[in-house]
Amino acid sequence: MSSIARWSYANVATVWPFVSRDPRTQAETYGAPYQIACTWISGAGRNRSSATGTRTDQNGQEYLVKQTIYTEDQRPVFRDMIATGVHTGTHQAAQANKVREVVSYDMSMFGEPDSPDFEVYV
């Protein structure tokens, strides 16, 4: 973890990685949960694309941002489930939300050339 992230990512989120989708039933399967260091805000954060906080995901679907999670961990990706806090049960029990988009930022200007930061939109 970079020196920038060490003080700013003081919270934890739990991620359930997307594994597969059954082609017949469309049921989604998720892997074992893991925790990431993060901080978060409700809504679209500083990168609002409109007054209502809407964005477009990689499938071209527009969505309303519920929460923006900031992290240095590069593991969360599109379609994973994520919830703030430490959770050990299912993503349904944690009321996790689906990751709709992940944006990365170059942190080399802060002396961290190999440590990008990420905004995870749900």
Image: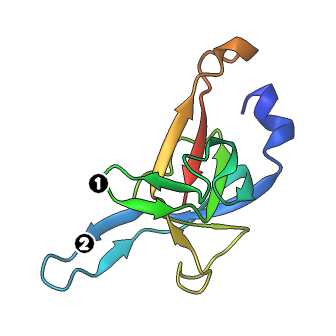
- Would residue 96 appear left or right of 78 to someone viewing this image? right
Name above or below for residue 94 compared with residue 35. below
Badge 2 is on which residue? Answer: 21
Q: Which mark is residue 23?
A: none
Badge 1 element: loop
- Would residue 15 appear left or right of 67 to someone viewing this image? left
- Would residue 41 appear left or right of 58 to someone viewing this image? right
Q: Position of residue 21 (x, y in %)?
A: 25, 72
* Rendered residue at 59%/86% (across/down): 93
- Please state, as top left, top right, bottom left or bottom right, where the C terminus lies in the image: bottom right
Q: Earlier in the sequence, mark 2 or mark 1?
A: 2
* Rendered residue at 65%/53% (across/down): 69
Q: Position of residue 34 (x, y in %)?
A: 58, 61
Going by the numbered disc 1, the residue's amino acid type is Asn
| Total marks in image | 2
Q: Position of residue 28 (x, y in %)?
A: 32, 76
* Rendered residue at 62%/26% (across/down): 115
How packed mark 1 is, by other alpha carbons closer than 10 Å (few <14, some 14-19, many 20 or more), is few
How packed mark 2 is, by other alpha carbons closer than 10 Å (few <14, some 14-19, many 20 or more), is few
Please identify the residue farthest to the front as the structure is shown: 51
The answer to whether residue 103 is seen in the rendering is: yes
* Rendered residue at 44%/51% (across/down): 77
- Please state, as top left, top right, bottom left or bottom right, where the N terminus lies in the image: top right
Badge 1 is on which residue? Answer: 59
Name above or below for residue 73 compared with residue 90. above
Q: Position of residue 97 (x, y in %)?
A: 54, 71
Cβ–Cβ under 8 Å for marks 2 and 1: no
The answer to whether residue 80 is seen in the rendering is: no
Going by the numbered disc 2, the residue's amino acid type is Arg
- Would residue 75 appear left or right of 47 to someone viewing this image? left
Q: CA distance from mark 2 to mark 1?
A: 16 Å
